[in-house]
């Protein structure tokens, strides 16, 4: 069984648009360094 990672242990960033913190997601694993916005809404509103 794979080792489980607690949600609190995941890396997080601050959204460039709304200034709220957001956590790492598996779909961002390959591109985490370039993720700036927490959602599509924030990305479009920049």
Image (cartoon, rainbow, N blue to C red):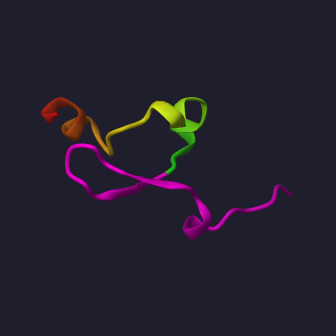
Count of labels shown? 0
Specify whether 36 is left or right of 27.
Answer: left
Q: Kindly identify the residue that appears in the image at 42 percent across and 35 percent down.
A: 35
Image coordinates of residue 4 in percent, x first then y, are 73, 62
Q: Residue furthest left?
A: 45
Specify whether residue 32 is painted magenta.
no
State the predominant SS element of the stretch in magenta.
Answer: loop
When asked about the image quadrant of residue 6, the answer is bottom right
Q: Kindly identify the residue that appears in the image at 13 percent across and 35 percent down.
A: 45
Above-or-below relation of 31 to 8: above
Specify whether residue 5 is painted magenta.
yes
Q: Kindly identify the residue that appears in the image at 46 percent across and 31 percent down.
A: 34
Q: Residue furthest right?
A: 1
Give the residues in magenta: 1-23
When asked about the image quadrant of residue 9, the answer is bottom right
Check the picture and name the quadrant holding the C terminus: top left
Image coordinates of residue 43 in percent, x first then y, are 24, 33
Above-or-below relation of 19 to 16: below
Specify whether 12 is left or right of 1.
Answer: left
Q: Kindly identify the residue that appears in the image at 27 percent across and 43 percent down.
A: 16
- Seen from the viewer's position, the closer of residues 46 and 44 is 46
Image coordinates of residue 1 in percent, x first then y, are 86, 57
Specify whether 32 is left or right of 4.
Answer: left
């Amino acid at each position: 069984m794979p080792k489980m990672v607690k949600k609190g242990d995941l890396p997080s960033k601050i959204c460039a648009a709304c200034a709220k913190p957001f956590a790492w997601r598996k779909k961002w694993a390959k591109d985490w360094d370039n993720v700036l916005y927490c959602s599509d809404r924030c990305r479009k509103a920049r």
